[in-house]
Image (spheres, rainbow, N blue to C red):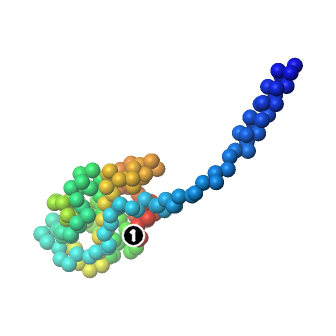
Amino acid sequence: MKSKTKSFNLLIALLFLVFTGCKNEGIQGPEGPAGLDATVFYSEWFTPSAWSGTSGDWFFDASAPDLTEDIVENGVILAYVWLAGDLYNASTVRPLPAYAIVANWSFLIFKFGSIEFTCDMISKPLTTGNKFRFIAIPGTIPALKSASLKNKSEQELRSMFYNDVCKLFNIPE
């Protein structure tokens, strides 16, 4: 009987320790980063100064020094357009590639450090009112890995609304 009483008291003491826990009186470290924006690169909105090309094959180049070989080859590049006169909504930001205003709009990286935006309109696209932007997410950084952990594949990132991508990576709109 004594053995059962000792075992019972030992069990009660053990349960007491488990449920009351221990207080951590140590020094608290600095707070971690607030978001995922530490190494995500993004451009400001810009308007082309001039379009080059011919009818059905228009393009303009923009300097993009953040688009290094490593980012282009291993990361994710997202590009967006805001078009003056967009039929659906004048404030719509479209992920590229997109079809709007009777044309296909897209982008490509033809050399590191530069981005080219394209349009297949018959007439030359406007240089005023149309705005373009890119977001570059390096593939080897915590930001892309964190986005992946939040169940966001590269394809899902590409199909997300612009505002949602900005919120995910703490990018000012």
- At horizontal 35% and vertical 61% (from top left) the residue drawn is 40
Q: Is residue 10 above or below residue 169?
A: above
Residue farthest toward the right in the current orientation of the protein: 1
- Residue 51, x across and y down, in percent: 17, 73
Location of mark 1 (residue)? 92
- At horizontal 23% and vertical 67% (from top left) the residue drawn is 64
Side (left or right) of 160 relative to 117: right
Amino acid at the residue labelled 1: Thr
Between 103 and 44, the residue placed more toward the observer is: 44
- At horizontal 51% and vertical 61% (from top left) the residue drawn is 30
Q: Quadrant of residue 47?
A: bottom left
- Residue 35, x across and y down, in percent: 46, 61
Side (left or right) of 14 relative to 141: right
- Residue 56, x across and y down, in percent: 16, 66
Q: Which secondary structure lies at badge 1?
A: loop
- At horizontal 33% and vertical 75% (from top left) the residue drawn is 85
Q: Quadrant of residue 38?
A: bottom left
